[in-house]
């Protein structure tokens, strides 16, 4: 079940500490508007960046107008810009301040329960993910222990049934949580969304024995899962996959390979689409494999532009023997299972895009307020004001579309699959544009790895490709409109 802290006393203590940090005039949103701060004595509190301590101030010193990026030049680091580098307490406070871009407040329209677990996710993102986001990216670290901490809050099986360890929340609730977590590290959150999709597939299409064998350890993230559909020769044309599974008594013998598998080689459970029958979608079945099975191996770790906190490898099957008891559903049902999983996966990845875009808008807003050119803050430039307004508008529009699709999927509406495709198309395109524009507003600084905005750009770019390319999303929408 989802674990949430409660009590008016805790909330009052947080508010008092926040106001003490920023002054008596500071006011913060209630549950859902932002994470609670860390005290300087706690791990991660009061971070330092290149000798500058930002733990007790709202922003670092303002640079001189025209400061460059050459050797020895003073860089206009803002509290928020450095948040993803050393988790200064001021950055977490900024994320929760009511005065910052309230028109894009992600808690607008949510129930009190939704605001509460949104606040839990935002707090976790600020405390456990944002401080390490750059390190995970640079060193290509798969943050297993951090994700297990997230699982203790119920984030390992968010929309999985409670009887096997899940939180039993709705698709809309799930979207809210992934958006919040993604503000701390988009790459790690995206992997968590894939893991959640795999657990849901086992929970929904597995029999009782399979559910109880696999789901509890996956919900706790004692074990991790990977989704295996794409192959070297079948990307968008997934129904043409070639990985074969020949039935021999009580086993299947798999041969073939999968490409671009998130978590591949480091994860424990593989939900694999394979061909047990003739050509086309009706010949595809779904098997659950476990790491260590004879004949299961992995390719080299891929070097990627982004998503570096999760490993990506080919998954290879060479006469890999899998018990028939590991098949989800009936033979020939695999493609349907894969597509139903992807409906939710598209909402999940769109939600991760929302979190990256929201963080980037805040980074841009803060940078424009601090950076000076031609003797005045960039925020006084009307062109940049208009661009910031457009970014905020596109963010809110994308969020509304994603949440509408999530609700339709939860309700089992007939138009849910196409709405999920529309939401994935619109949100991932628009949110990448928002992050890219935020980088542009940072000028040369945005291209430096000292600044988090460039990592959001790199991590979010692939969202327009995976879970069905945005070209395929357009095909799905057009087919729906033109069908007789």
Image (tube, helix red, strand yellow):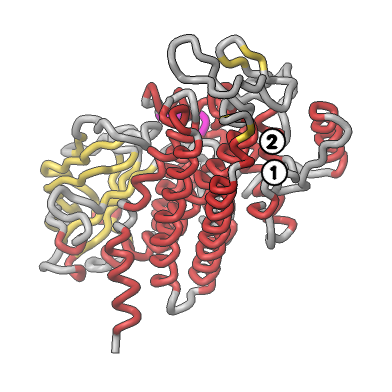
Asked if residue 6 lies left or right of residue 198, the reply is: right
Asked if residue 381 lies left or right of residue 341, the reply is: right
Residue in front for this viewpoint, 282 or 37: 37
Q: Label the magenta part by its dominant secondary structure.
A: helix
Find out whether the residues at labels 2 and 1 contact each other: C-beta distance under 8 Å: yes
Q: CA distance from mark 2 to mark 1?
A: 7 Å
Residue at x-position 52% and y-position 43%: 182
What is the quadrant of the C terminus in the image?
A: bottom left
Residue in front for this viewpoint, 367 or 271: 367
Instruction: Please tell me the numbered disc located at residue 242.
Output: none
Residue at x-position 62% and y-position 29%: 375
Residue in front for this viewpoint, 191 or 23: 23
Instruction: Please tell me the numbered disc located at residue 94.
Output: 2
- The mark that comes first in sequence, 2 or 1, is 2
Residue at x-position 21% and y-position 44%: 259
Asked if residue 447 lies left or right of residue 21, the reply is: left
User: How many other residues sit within 10 Å of disc 2, few (<14), some (14-19) or many (≥20)?
Assistant: many
Position in image of residue 20 (x %, y %): 85, 27
Residue in front for this viewpoint, 149 or 396: 396
User: To which residue does mark 1 refer?
Assistant: 100
Residue 282 seen in the figure? yes
Residue 211 seen in the figure? no
Q: Quadrant of residue 76?
A: top right
Element type at marker 2? helix
Where does the magenta region start and end?
A: 142-146
């Amino acid at each position: 079940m989802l674990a949430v802290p409660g009590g008016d006393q805790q909330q009052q203590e947080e508010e008092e500490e926040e106001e003490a940090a920023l002054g008596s005039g500071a006011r913060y949103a209630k549950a859902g508007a932002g994470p609670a701060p860390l005290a300087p004595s706690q791990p991660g509190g009061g971070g330092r960046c290149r000798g500058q301590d930002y733990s007790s101030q709202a922003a670092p010193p303002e640079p001189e107008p025209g400061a460059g990026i050459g050797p020895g030049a003073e860089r206009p680091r803002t509290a928020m810009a450095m948040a993803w580098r050393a988790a200064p307490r001021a950055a977490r406070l900024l994320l929760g301040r009511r005065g910052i871009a309230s028109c894009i407040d992600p808690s607008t329209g949510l129930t009190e329960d939704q605001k509460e677990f949104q606040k839990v996710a935002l707090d976790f993102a600020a405390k456990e993910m944002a401080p390490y986001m750059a390190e995970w990216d640079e060193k290509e670290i798969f943050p297993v222990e951090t994700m297990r901490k997230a699982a203790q809050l119920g984030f390992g099986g968010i929309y999985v049934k409670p009887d096997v360890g899940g939180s039993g929340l709705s698709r809309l609730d799930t979207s809210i949580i992934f958006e919040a977590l993604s503000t701390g590290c988009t790459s790690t959150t995206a992997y968590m969304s894939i893991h959640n999709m795999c657990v849901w597939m086992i929970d929904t299409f597995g029999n009782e024995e399979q559910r109880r064998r696999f789901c509890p350890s996956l919900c706790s993230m004692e074990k991790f899962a990977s989704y295996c559909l794409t192959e070297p020769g079948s990307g968008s044309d997934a129904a043409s996959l070639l990985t074969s599974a020949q039935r021999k008594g009580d086993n299947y013998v798999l041969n073939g390979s999968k490409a671009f598998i998130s978590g591949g080689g480091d994860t424990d459970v593989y939900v694999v689409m394979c061909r047990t029958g003739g050509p086309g979608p009706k010949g595809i079945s779904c098997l659950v494999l476990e790491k260590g099975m004879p004949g299961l191996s992995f390719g080299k770790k891929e070097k990627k532009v982004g998503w570096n906190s999760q490993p990506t490898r080919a998954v290879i099957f060479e006469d890999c023997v899998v018990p028939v008891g590991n098949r989800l559903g009936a033979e020939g049902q695999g493609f349907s299972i894969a597509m139903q999983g992807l409906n939710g996966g598209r909402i999940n990845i769109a939600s991760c895009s929302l979190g990256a875009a929201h963080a980037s808008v805040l980074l841009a807003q803060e940078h424009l307020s601090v950076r000076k050119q031609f003797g005045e803050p960039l925020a006084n430039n009307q062109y940049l004001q208009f661009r910031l307004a457009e970014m905020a508008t596109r963010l809110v529009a994308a969020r509304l579309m994603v949440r509408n699709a999530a609700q339709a999927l939860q309700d089992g509406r007939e138009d849910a699959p196409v709405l999920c495709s529309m939401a994935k198309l619109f949100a991932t395109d628009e949110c990448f544009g928002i992050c890219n524009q935020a980088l542009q507003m940072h000028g040369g600084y945005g291209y430096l790895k000292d600044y988090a905005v460039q990592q959001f750009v790199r991590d979010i770019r692939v969202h327009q490709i995976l879970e069905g390319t945005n070209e395929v999303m357009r095909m799905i929408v057009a087919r729906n409109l033109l069908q007789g």
